[in-house]
Image (spheres, helix red, strand yellow):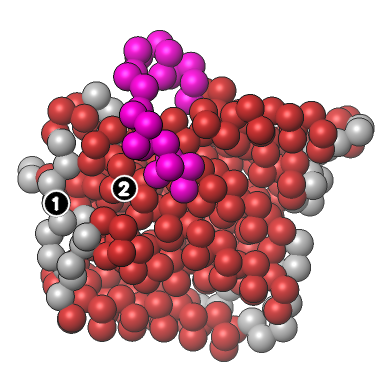
Amino acid sequence: MDESKRGWINGFVGVAIFSASLPATRVAVADFDPVFLTVARALIAGLLAASLLIVLKQERPGWTDILALLIVALGVVVGFPLLTALALQHITSAHSIVFIGLLPLATALFGVIRAGDSPRPAFWLFSVAGSALVAGYALTHDLSASWVGDALMIAAIIVCGLGYAEGARLSRKLGGWQVISWALVLSLPVMAVLVYLTMPPIIKNIGLPAWIALGYVSLFSMMIGFVFWFRGLAQGGIAAVGQLQLLQPFMGLTLAALLLGEAVSWQMAAVSVAVVACVVGAKKYANESAKPNPSKFLQS
């Protein structure tokens, strides 16, 4: 199996893991303050990342990589989790998930700017069409959403797209899991202080579902998912593999319906089929990006 196909498989696993993030966040913010949830998940994942880096004796990144790691940390460790947690105080997880359909386009654009990807014109047609389908589905099925929640979700998509592209670019040098691990470690001191300052005064009032949701977003959404996702983006190309995120809203909507009992229209199935077609089309016309360093991924 060539690197490109491995990239699509790894990317799909990452998207599947991320698809449960917003429903889990919705459960968690019912009992946890959004700021505490953001810093707590980063602290838990950061402690795990630090342990792995020490046990596996990973080489420290160079000074030239620190700025890129800070961008990754601000985008995916702090920015996206915090903005989505704040948004979910105003909108349902089913509504917030549809904004993820704009993330492939944002990731592809930053992939061009930051990583030198060069998809063919037809790629952009499929990417824009897929994003339009998801956005259109949102607008026609939930017009009662809060503009504050929508604005927060759009901001989350922008910072996350930048963080994804930067992380994938750096993964070609450092390796997939190493990038998210170092980004988490860089944010660890600040997260520890913020956890102490924002900790709920009465822990016993927090329900078991909220604790389980915190565990999921800390270990899977914040760490394990990125192991597959950054590796997939680096192997198969940021713009190309990034289109798999078009599937995430519909995976997430299904989970929101099954786990949270949120209403999801049957029309979702028809839109999902069209979105899959856009992903296939985008894959066909995306130029292959620069190959990663195979030795780094053997360490992953």
Q: From the viewer's perspective, is residue 157 above or below residue 285? A: above
Left or right relative to 268: residue 94:
right
The label on residue 168 is 2
In the rendering, at what x and y percent does residue 209 appear? 72, 41
> SS class of the residue under badge 2?
helix
Q: Residue at x 35, y 12 (%)?
A: 57
As shown in the figure, which amino acid type bears the numbered disc 2?
Ala
As shown in the figure, which amino acid type bears the numbered disc 1?
Ala
In the rendering, at what x and y percent does residue 81 appear? 60, 51
Q: Residue at x 51, y 59 (%)?
A: 159
Q: Residue at x 64, y 73 (%)?
A: 151
> What residue span does the magenta drawing correspond to?
49-71
Which residue, as the protein is rendered here, is positioned at the far right?
A: 202
Q: Is residue 21 visible?
A: no
The label on residue 55 is none
Which quarter of the figure has residue 241? Answer: bottom left
- Asked whether 28 or 50 is in front, the reply is 50
Left or right relative to 166: residue 41:
right
